[in-house]
Image: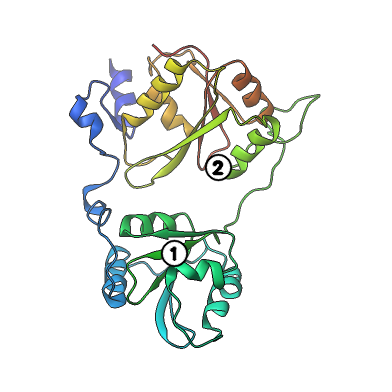
Amino acid sequence: MKGISLMKLRRPFRYNSKASAAQQVQDASQPQDAANHQSMVLDKDLQQNIHQIRAIYAKSSDIIYRSFYIEGQTKAILIYIDGLSDSAGIEKNVITPLMHEINGEATAISQLAERKISAAQAIPFTTFGECVSYLANGLPVLILDQEATGLAFGLNKWEKRSIEEPAAESGIRGPREGFTETLRINTSLIRRIVKSPLLKMETMKIGGYTQTNVVIAYIEGLAEKNLVEEVITRLKRIRIDGILESGYIEELIEDMPFSPFPQLMSTERPDVACANLLEGRVAILVEGTPFVLIEVHPLE
């Protein structure tokens, strides 16, 4: 009994497997103090928008605010997080084209991506919740005066580890590459092996403060539909402040968390993950960790 009490104290999460239907429908993954801005829409007054974003990111010295005029007429501001965005790409693909005056006519934000912006992605958004989500993922955002719609650009860039052979799972034959801490690199490693469009990857965010991206990967037609739905349901039931690595997920969705026997397998090798996907299993990829979870036994 004493050992169990210590383990309960050690586990930094809150989970209720018998939550009511109303509680499961309610999105409790957001902390109450951060949920106020989620549904707030942008104002046409640029100063009001700037004031709101500064209030959200108060006491944050890594938030960069770059004010300028588009073609010398329309006032705009570009916001990004230092260290998560490509500052050189922002200067080259966004600020310079917008400041360069061509015909002296004001350009609507809906036309900027087509006429001036050379970034690969230009995603419109209308709420502060979307704005904060894009900023947190390294995408710089552009907001114009007299416009209630902003643009987020695919110019995120941060330091990441190169693809290497996993030290804990070295093999004599086969590929010498392993998963990294970057989620999109990991999903691409799986896509390079399983090229079929039947490979599905559903994404959700878990963690009230970390908002960690989690991907559920499976091959449609090979994985049982009930198994996929059960995995997704268990992930949606998680109520926790933060997910730092896949071990948190493992403890929260397995049937017997105190059992000494593993109920989920973890791997750092893309070929092992793909082999299990081809056997009809479900893989869970978590942002920030190279360990991918594989369902070993059907969840009941």
Left or right of 12 in this view: 297: right
Left or right of 63 in this view: 287: right
Q: Is residue 245 visible?
A: no
Q: Circle 1 is placed at which residue position? A: 151
Q: Quadrant of residue 178?
A: top right
Image x and y of residue 151, in percent: 44, 64
Q: Are marks 1 and 2 in contact (CB under 8 Å)?
A: no
Image x and y of residue 84, in percent: 51, 60
Q: Circle 2 is placed at which residue position? A: 183
Return the residue nearer the eye: 218 or 157: 218
The residue positioned 29% from the left and 65% from the top of the image is: 42
Check disc 2 and report its element: helix, strand or loop: helix
How many labels, in total? 2
Q: Is residue 286 visible?
A: yes
Q: Is residue 26 above or below residue 60?
A: above
Callout 2 amino acid: Leu
Check disc 1 and report its element: helix, strand or loop: strand
- Tell me, for residue 21, which label it has, or none: none
Q: Cα distance, mark 1 to mark 2? A: 24 Å
Callout 1 amino acid: Leu
Residue that extends furthest to the right in the rendered view of this protein: 173
Left or right of 49 in this view: 80: right
Q: Quadrant of residue 236?
A: top left
Return the residue nearer the eye: 89 or 17: 89
Q: Is residue 85 above or below residue 246?
A: below
Image x and y of residue 50, in percent: 31, 73
The residue positioned 56% from the left and 32% from the top of the image is: 291
Q: Is residue 281 above or below residue 28?
A: above
Density class for disc 2 (Cα within 10 Å; few <14, some 14-19, many ≥20) is some
The residue positioned 34% from the left and 71% from the top of the image is: 147
Q: Quadrant of the N terminus?
A: top left
Left or right of 125 in this view: 220: right
